[in-house]
Image (cartoon, rainbow, N blue to C red):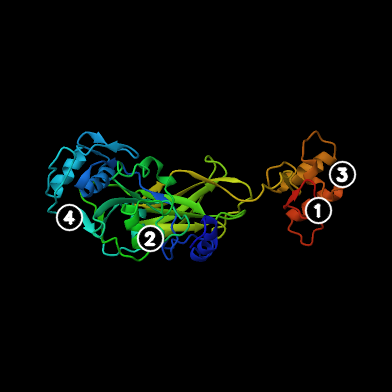
Amino acid sequence: MKKKWFSFAAVFLALVLFCGNGISAKPFFEREIYPEVLLEVPRIKQSSNGCVIASFASAEAYLRGTYGGVTYEFGQDYPWQTPIYDLMLDMMETEATGPNGFVDGYNRIPPDNWVEIKDLSLDNLYKNLMKGKPIVICSETLGHTSLLIGYIGPYDSLEESGFVVLDVFSKMYPKNDINDISAIPTGDYPEDSCYRSLSDHLLHEHKLTQAYVPQPKTSRPKPPEFFGTGAVGITDDNAILWQSHTSVQCSEIGFYLGTNAENMKRYAEQTGAAAENASFDLKEAGCRLNGGTDYVYQTFFVYGGKEYVSEPKTFRTTGDPSPILPEAKILGDADGNGKVTSTDKVLLSRFLAKWNVTIDEKACDLNRNGTLESAEAVVIARYLAKWSNLPYAIGERVEENAH
């Protein structure tokens, strides 16, 4: 797994198959395929041994959004004296013993409404991230705790981290600035930082010893929501859309797609099954994409009779745009309404009789000889009478420059 995104296309195509012309909600974690995901987590700062408390406080700030009159926003630093830090001190049955948030120890870990996850595999950590769950990770070997907030890889290989970890020792390691998380290259971490802890764990050195995730509770209810969407495996005529959302009993899943946000077509499948992620192969779903073209898409799921739709995103197919062709005509369509009816036969007959009527002469010139003749009106009449073996493709689309 040491390639960039484009190398994953073949694997995605093998993983994500559709049945007939429908959409299949295939589990999205059958192999080590990890789309980029990042949780918008604020940072509660501390010094010394407040690392554990600060990690849980940052996670709670993300889950609650607003607490104690303070609204927590991504990319913002908050002092350890912030109300959410005090809340975690109470929840973990401890107290700050100095002016800088120093904590000698704590009596309760994990705090209420947090549970330890036993499966510390890369796949399971990623599943929890895709469910919108920040993960507090601990390394007994390094005596360090941090907050796992996302995955922005792959860089050189999945095994060498690629995960974004909130290293709360910002003064000690200023280069790990949360405002520049995308610039952290694989392996660019201090020997004793939480980056080392996670990377070594993923390299099977088992230095990551515990991980904790939040559990839902009545005081933090959340309606069904999207955790992430994206487009991968993009070629000149295909792409694969993916979605991850709250695990609910969906009655329908699908996506909207078009070349502009005001004119998107809806593709859907009835499911009636619990789902939390799905992927959609556009070609298999019947979408005809053009090369070098910008597309707008949204994915959706229906729960409890309500449709939940992701934010609109765009992708561009590879290759060059197709040349603009002349507008296609419907052969025999005199009035230009897109179909051949008895009206067209009458209009053509009247036009040939020199009546003052307007028709689409190119559509009625069946043999493309530049002249309208009574024989062409006869052919249209026979088409309407359902004759077979007609000499021209009446009723079919024909380009203006076709001969």
Residue 144 is left or right of residue 157, and the answer is left
Whether residue 246 can be seen here: no
Residue 1 is left or right of residue 52, and the answer is right
Near mark 4 (Cα within 10 A), the count class, few <14, some 14-19 or many ≥20, is some
Whether residue 365 can be seen here: yes
Report which quarter residue 276 is drawn in: bottom left
Residue 98 is left or right of residue 265, and the answer is left
Residue 301: x %, y % from top left: 40, 52
Q: Nearer the viewer, mark 2 or mark 3?
A: 2
Q: Earlier in the sequence, mark 4 or mark 1?
A: 4
Mark-to-mark CA distance, 2 and 4: 38 Å
Q: Nearer the viewer, mark 2 or mark 1?
A: 2
Q: Earlier in the sequence, mark 3 or mark 4?
A: 4
Nearer to the camera, 46 or 124: 46
Q: Which residue is mark 4?
A: 109
Q: Vertically, is 68 above or below 202?
A: above
Q: Amino acid at mark 4?
A: Ile
Q: Amino acid at mark 2?
A: Gly
Q: Which residue is mark 1?
A: 379
Nearer to the camera, 24 or 69: 69
Residue 82 is left or right of residue 265, and the answer is left
What is the number of the mark on residue 272?
A: 2
Count of all numbered marks drawn on residues in the image: 4
Q: Vertically, is 69 above or below 9?
A: above
Badge 4 element? loop
Q: Which residue is mark 3?
A: 370
Q: Amino acid at mark 3?
A: Gly
Q: Earlier in the sequence, mark 2 or mark 1?
A: 2
Q: Earlier in the sequence, mark 2 or mark 3?
A: 2
